[in-house]
Image (cartoon, rainbow, N blue to C red):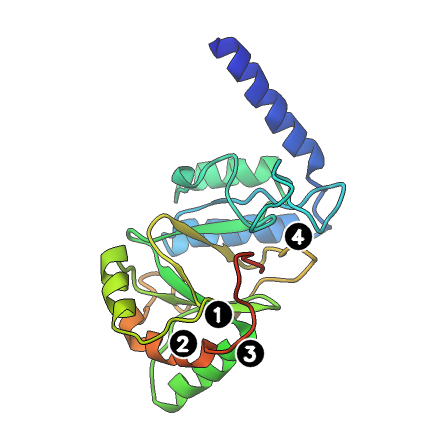
Amino acid sequence: MREILGRRLQRLRNRLQSLRPAPPQGEAPALLDAALTCATTWNWPVLPGVGRSGVDSARCACPDPDCAVPGAHPFDPGLLAATTDPRMVSWWWANRAGAPILLATGGSAPCAVSLPAAAAARAVARLDAEGMRLGPIVATPTRWSLLVEPYSLERLGEILYAKDHVPSSLRFHGEGGYLLLPPSLAIGGGQVRWEREPAGAGGIWLPEVEAVVDALVEASSGASGGGSRLAY
């Protein structure tokens, strides 16, 4: 039985590998360098995302035709495999050169709060005007993600319970979650970039989630980009 399951898993891996397109020239080294920087310089656990289908670049390479986060989620390896080991990171991207970079959020790693791009720009402008110190911000064509200090689900629940309304377009990437990092490509060819890059070699400063959540809730109220499909 183990041999049968092992052969089936290997066939599935081979199928996924055949569906992944070769990365454009120059993309592979940039992804590997970025993944190694996350793992070794910032001590952030990372892993490769499943990526895009080689048959249809607008679809996920995973077997689910209705994938909610196409291309930008763990599959093989799973999320628990995320690591800061440079040897493992190098091996992954040597075998899957065009794979997007995923940060495993929570624990000792940063967490994040994401919202539609236009709403996020308003919120960031407001926080800047108030003199709030912000950490790194990840941007895609449709959403921005503000990195914050790690928080527990219990603490997040207490914070949100005190709010009259939390928009569905506001999403939280905490313990057991993940976040797409630059310079990955989102489905449809959108580039993931740093709106604000991490500063310093190590010990990157991050705000507490309590410090930014009010502005993010207010800015995302009524914003488009809600719903169950977690488009990037």
As shown in the figure, which amino acid type bears the numbered disc 2?
Answer: Leu
Task: Say which of 157 and 128 sits in front.
Answer: 157
Per the image, label 1 sits on a secondary structure element best described as: strand
Q: In which quarter of the view is residue 133 placed?
A: bottom left
| Left or right: residue 82 compared with residue 71 | left
- Return the residue at label 4: 27
First in sequence, mark 4 or 2: give its number: 4
Residue occupying image coordinates x 31% and y 62%: 203
Image coordinates for residue 21, horizontal then vertical, percent:
72, 42
Question: Dot 2, how many residues are within 10 Å of its Cα: few (below 14), some (14-19), or many (20+)?
Answer: many
Residue occupying image coordinates x 55% and y 73%: 117
- Separation of residues labelled 3 and 4 (CA atoms): 28 Å
Residue occupying image coordinates x 52% and y 38%: 75
Q: Which mark is residue 118?
A: 3
On-image quarter of the C terminus: bottom right
Q: Dots 1 and 2: beta carbons under 8 Å?
A: yes
Image coordinates for residue 28, horizontal then vertical, percent:
64, 48
Q: Which mark is residue 216?
A: 2
As shown in the figure, which amino acid type bears the numbered disc 4?
Answer: Glu
- Return the residue at label 1: 115
First in sequence, mark 1 or 2: give its number: 1
Toward the bottom, the furthest residue is: 129
Q: In which quarter of the view is residue 97 placed?
A: top right
